Image: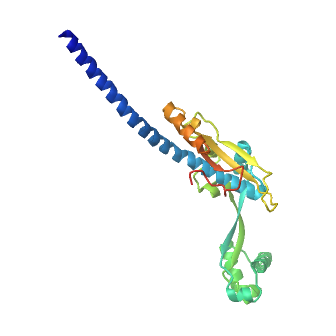
Amino acid sequence: MKTKTIMRILLAVAVVVMAYFCITSVVTPIKFEEKRAQREVAVIKNLVSIRTAEAEFRAINGRYTANADSLLMFLKTTPKKEVMKEGSLTDKQLEAGLTEHKAVKIMQNAKKKALSMKNLSFENDSALYAYIWENDKEVKSNGLSGFRRDTIIKNMIETLYKGEYTVETIDQIMLIPYTDNQRFELEVNDTYTTSQGIRVPLFEARAHYNTYLADLDDQERVNLIDKEEKLEHYPGLKIGDITSPNNNAGNWE
């Protein structure tokens, strides 16, 4: 009788243990994927911010940089020049030979003349242009009333990120979320040449699964890495590619 009771108890325990492992085998992958998806939103956000910075760095310097500190210093200290545009040339003006360059030159000369007149003063640029459009003969004869082109200097960080970061917080874009302040890996290739003989600078920023998923289930992470490597994919998130041009796309896009 005692033996039967013990067997029943052991069987019940075995059933509970098996049920636990069955549930765990289903729940663990689901929880892992949920947390992975949540974390990758934050990682992707920073990668996109890095891409924005690298694109601006290349536009001014003709190359990308693999030095995170240099890229951050560039964002903090380099002014952003933007052309403020108002008005546009009509087809009739273009057919008559008036180009954007010529129109800008006419406006620049008109501004110099107006500002050099001692009996005139202007509260702001709007007042200055209003006077030019109304009174300058060359501007009026070329139909440039309402036409304006001004180069304005803006803060690089505010311009690129629309107030999302400041000088004090911009360093955050280099840190991989859900890590102990680990930085993204940056790499550049300045020697890539197309089949047409054109040299194209390339860059890549990346975060391995072992960084932002390090504290999650080990086996699930190992399985994920193994799966991506078998497919010859980078086991993590990255943007850009140092082996071939891809328009700086992310591997999730």
Q: Residue furthest top?
A: 2
Q: What residue lies at 53% left-to-right and 39% top-to-bottom?
A: 224
Residue 241 locus on image (x, y percent): 68, 50
Quarter occupied by the N terminus: top left
Q: Is residue 33 above or below residue 2?
A: below
Residue 99: percent from left, percent from top: 76, 81
**Rendering coords of residue 176 (x, y %):** 59, 40
Q: Position of residue 64 (x, y in %)?
A: 74, 51
- Residue at 29% from the left image edge and 21% from the top image edge: 13
Q: How is the image coloured?
A: rainbow
Front-most of residues 87 and 49: 49
Look at the picture and state if 249 lies above or below 68: below
Query: Does residue 142 lie above or below 119 as drawn?
Result: below
Quadrant of the image occupied by residue 8 = top left
Residue at 60% in and 41% down: 229
So how many labels did they put on this image?
0
Residue 123 seen in the figure:
no
Q: Is residue 34 left or right of residue 235?
A: left
Q: Which residue sits at x=71%, y=47%?
A: 71
Residue 156 against residue 111 in the figure, above or below: above
Residue 162, quarter of the rendered image: bottom right
**Residue that sits furthest to the left in the current view:** 1
Q: Residue lying furthest right in this view?
A: 197
Residue 52 seen anywhere in this rendered image of the structure: yes
- Taking depth in this image into account, of 1 and 177 the one nearest to the observer is 1
Quarter of the image containing the C terminus?
Answer: bottom right
Q: Between residues 18 and 117, which one lies in front from this camera angle?
A: 18
